[in-house]
Image (cartoon, helix red, strand yellow):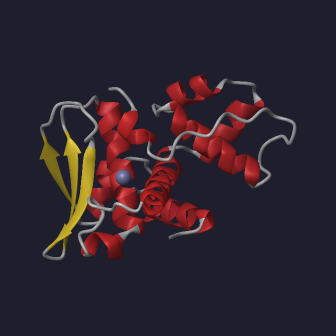
Amino acid sequence: MSSKKEIWTRAHEVVRKYGGGARDPFRIADAKGYMIEDLYMRADRTKGFAQIAAGRTLLHINRNLSEEMQRMTCAHELGHATLHRRILKQGLLCEYDLFMAKTRLEFEANLFAAYLLMDEKEVVRCVREGCSLEWIAGHMDVHPNYAALIIRSLYDRGKLPKEMKLPDMPDCQFLGFIDD
Ligand SMILES: [Zn+2]
């Protein structure tokens, strides 16, 4: 389990250290020495998964998804690989059947992905200019649920106007349910 602050710190750290400031999860994964494994599955709920095998970190990405969805999936799996290494080493992530624990892990990976993919300063600027959640998401090439997570996080940290109307919070496991 990681605190939101820890997740924020880890995501910004990988962008800075491994992405050269770029928010490209594939580049970051490569710089960290993680292997990207191509999956070719029907675009059902399996968008990807992370694995640690024989000391190597593998991010499996369904290449039948759209480019944007592959990018979001890679950022999410990078979140698992960064935050949940102990669980991945035990090989438990796929079979996790404790509902709460599973949703908590999904939430953490999604929050990590949101921090990795979106520039907070730009989000604050857009919100202050009155842009809608959907517009901000489109502008940053992410699903609106990621934009909702970031806006909520910025609001909780006092970075957005107190009187603003907050978007509804997405379901923890939303990545799996997005149609592509
Ligand atoms: Zn996940």
Residue 106, given in percent of the width and then of the height, sits at: 44, 54
Whether residue 129 is situated above or below residue 171 in the rendered picture = above
Q: Who's the residue at 87% across and 36% down the image? A: 163
| Residue 17, percent from left and from top | 43, 65
Q: Which residue is located at x 33 percent, y 62 percent?
A: 96
Residue 171, compared with residue 52, is above or below; it is above
Q: Where is residue 87 in the image (x, y as percent from the top left)?
A: 33, 72
179 above or below 35?
above
Query: Is 45 positioned to the left or the right of 42 in the image?
Result: right
> In which quadrant of the rendered image does the C terminus lie?
top left
Q: In this view, does 143 lie to the left or right of 178?
A: right
State the residue at coordinates (38%, 68%): 84
The number of callouts visible is 0
Q: Residue furthest front?
A: 98
Q: In the depicted view, which residue is nearer to us: 143 or 106?
A: 106
Q: In this view, does 51 lie to the left or right of 84?
A: left
Residue at 38 percent of width and 66 percent of height: 82
Whole-percent x and y of residue 11? 49, 60
The residue nearer to you, when weighing 65 against 26, is: 65
Q: Which of 96 and 116 is in front in this view?
A: 96
* Position above or below: 29 against 161: below
